[in-house]
Image: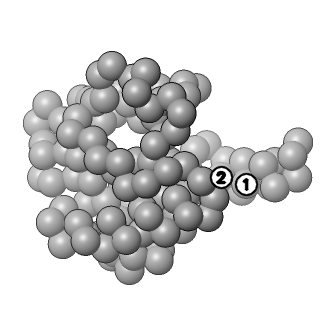
Amino acid sequence: MKILFVTAHLDKGGGQQTQSYRIIHELSKRHEVRLLTLKTPYHKKVIDYPCETEFAGELKFPWGIFSLSNKIRQLKDHYDVIQTLDAYYSLPALWLSGAKNSVARLGIDPVKDLKARKLGN
């Protein structure tokens, strides 16, 4: 199976990034896997990305969304599944790309998460 993972970044740490790294790493042992992400000031400090990694642009709002969307549009027909890993960059980018073969993972309670970030709580 060919899987494209899309996320804003994996290089600043945290629970979501750690879990995403582990999932991608394990799946890349048995499947063709690529990670599409954005550059942050920390991206060069990651020594071992979990698979083939491509940087679509910079982690800057809203331009990073459009960079991811354009790259997804170019790649979508090559992959069986496109898995998004964040609600702020990759999910809107996926929607803008028009890709139909996609799955979104937004955490345990995405509504609560989105509300908390919008309100800054």
Label 2 – label 1 distance at C-alpha:
6 Å
| Residue 13 in picture, x, y percent from top left | 54, 25
Name the mark on residue 36: none
Could you say whether the residue bearing mark 1 is in a helix, strand or loop? helix
Q: In the image, what residue type sits under mark 2?
A: Pro
**In the displayed structure image, the side of residue 100 where residue 110 appears, left or right:** right
| Residue 81 in picture, x, y percent from top left | 26, 60
Residue holding disc 2? 110
Q: In the image, what residue type sits under mark 1?
A: Leu
Residue holding disc 1? 114
User: What residue appears at the point 33 percent right and 19 percent down from the top-left corner?
Assistant: 47
**In the displayed structure image, the side of residue 41 where residue 37 appears, left or right:** left
| Residue 73 in picture, x, y percent from top left | 31, 73
Q: Nearer the viewer, residue 85 or 40?
A: 40
Residue 19 lies in quadrant: top left
User: What residue appears at the point 65 percent right and 52 percent down from the top-left corner?
Assistant: 110
Q: Is residue 81 visible?
A: yes
User: What residue appears at the point 38 percent right and 80 percent down from the top-left corner?
Assistant: 98
| Residue 26 in picture, x, y percent from top left | 24, 29
Q: Nearer the viewer, residue 67 or 90?
A: 67
Query: Is there a contact, CB below 8 Å, between mark 2 and mark 1?
Result: yes
